[in-house]
Image (spheres, rainbow, N blue to C red):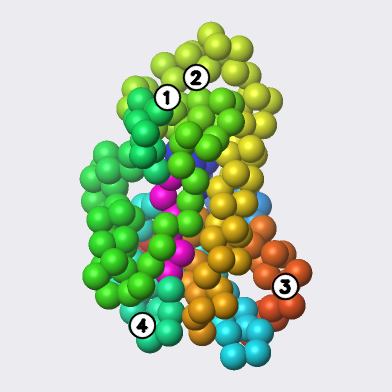
């Protein structure tokens, strides 16, 4: 999920704290559920993500909903849930091999503020040490100019108000922002699907631990390839207490 999403969540949550009642909490729950396409759920104890298992013949695909910011035990649990033998993990992570962009996405500051774990540190390194893996995300040079600018804005460290001001100065209005975000997501989904088709036949298990905003699209693609949903599990990703 993007920083913009979590900023909206924080604003709604603060409203719930100021005027806390069941109705306000339900509004926040509904917002998160809708934005997470039904794969992320808010409860009084924290934020829960869903893991899905699809199967065709003797091959399994694990769709594992992720957040960049979560408890370390969540990331460890994901690593331990993926079989080592006969499996490959398709990792997310936009690259910039030719240094086209000024800055990459950086969730470290937010992770430190929340006193929790950053995905690249707590998850990717463990996966690389124990599993066969492949990055299945796009490189900045392959993005459209609009998607590239969207990525650069997300990665900036200045205050949200300053970022919004920059967007407006560039005539990158709310509609333009949404259009660029959609384009950016579509570019990444296409690359993931391309990578899956390239490697799937060589493994009995393909694990896809990606942000929940991507999972719904990939569900449809798996179903088009005659995979069937055989399992679903909800896991606490970020505990409040």
Position of residue 3 measured from the top left corner of the image (x, y, whole percent)? 45, 38
Residue at 33 percent across and 42 percent down: it is: 107
Q: In the rendered structure, are the residues bearing label 3 and label 1 in contact, judged by CB atoms less than 8 Å apart?
A: no
Classed neighbour count for the residue bearing mark 1: other residues with Cα under 10 Å, few (<14), some (14–19), many (≥20): some
Q: Which residue is mark 3?
A: 225
* Mark closer to the chain start, 4 or 1: 4
Cα distance between the residues tagged 2 and 1: 6 Å
Label 4's element?
A: loop
* Mark closer to the chain start, 3 or 4: 4
Position of residue 154 measured from the top left corner of the image (x, y, whole percent)? 44, 32
Cα distance between the residues tagged 3 and 4: 24 Å
Which mark identifies residue 164? 2
* Mark closer to the chain start, 2 or 3: 2
Q: Which residue is mark 4?
A: 84
Which region is colored magenta? 89-94
Closest to the observer, 96 or 18: 96
Position of residue 104 measured from the top left corner of the image (x, y, whole percent)? 36, 35
Classed neighbour count for the residue bearing mark 3: other residues with Cα under 10 Å, few (<14), some (14–19), many (≥20): few
Q: In the rendered structure, are the residues bearing label 2 and label 1 in contact, judged by CB atoms less than 8 Å apart?
A: yes
Q: Which residue is mark 1?
A: 160
Residue at 68 percent across and 70 percent down: it is: 222
Closest to the observer, 128 or 213: 128
**Is 240 above or below relative to 207?**
above
* Mark closer to the chain start, 3 or 1: 1
Classed neighbour count for the residue bearing mark 2: other residues with Cα under 10 Å, few (<14), some (14–19), many (≥20): some
Cα distance between the residues tagged 2 and 4: 44 Å
Residue at the far top in the pictured view: 169
Residue 73 falls inside the magenta stretch: no
Closest to the observer, 55 or 46: 55
**Is 65 above or below relative to 30?**
below
Closest to the observer, 166 or 70: 166
């Amino acid at each position: 999920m993007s920083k913009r999403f979590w900023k909206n969540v924080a604003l709604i949550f603060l409203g719930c704290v100021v005027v806390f009642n069941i109705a306000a909490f339900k509004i926040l729950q509904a917002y998160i559920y809708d934005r997470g396409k039904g794969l992320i759920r808010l409860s009084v104890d924290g934020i829960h993500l869903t893991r899905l298992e699809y199967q065709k013949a003797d091959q399994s695909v694990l769709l594992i909903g992720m957040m960049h910011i979560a408890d370390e035990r969540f990331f460890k649990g994901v690593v331990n849930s993926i079989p080592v033998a006969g499996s490959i993990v398709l990792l997310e992570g936009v690259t910039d091999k030719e240094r086209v962009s000024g800055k990459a996405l950086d969730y470290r500051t937010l992770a430190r503020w929340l006193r929790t774990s950053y995905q690249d540190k707590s998850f990717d390194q463990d996966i690389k040490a124990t599993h066969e893996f492949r990055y299945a995300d796009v490189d900045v040079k392959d993005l459209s100019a609009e998607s590239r600018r969207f990525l650069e804005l997300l990665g900036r460290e200045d205050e949200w108000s300053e970022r919004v001001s920059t967007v407006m100065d560039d005539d990158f209005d709310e509609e333009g922002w949404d259009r660029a975000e959609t384009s950016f997501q579509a570019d990444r989904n296409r690359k993931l699907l391309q990578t899956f088709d390239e490697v799937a036949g060589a493994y009995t298990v393909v694990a896809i631990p990606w942000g929940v905003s991507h999972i719904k699209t990939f569900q449809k693609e798996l179903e088009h390839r005659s995979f069937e949903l055989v399992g679903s599990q909800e896991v606490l990703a970020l505990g409040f207490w």
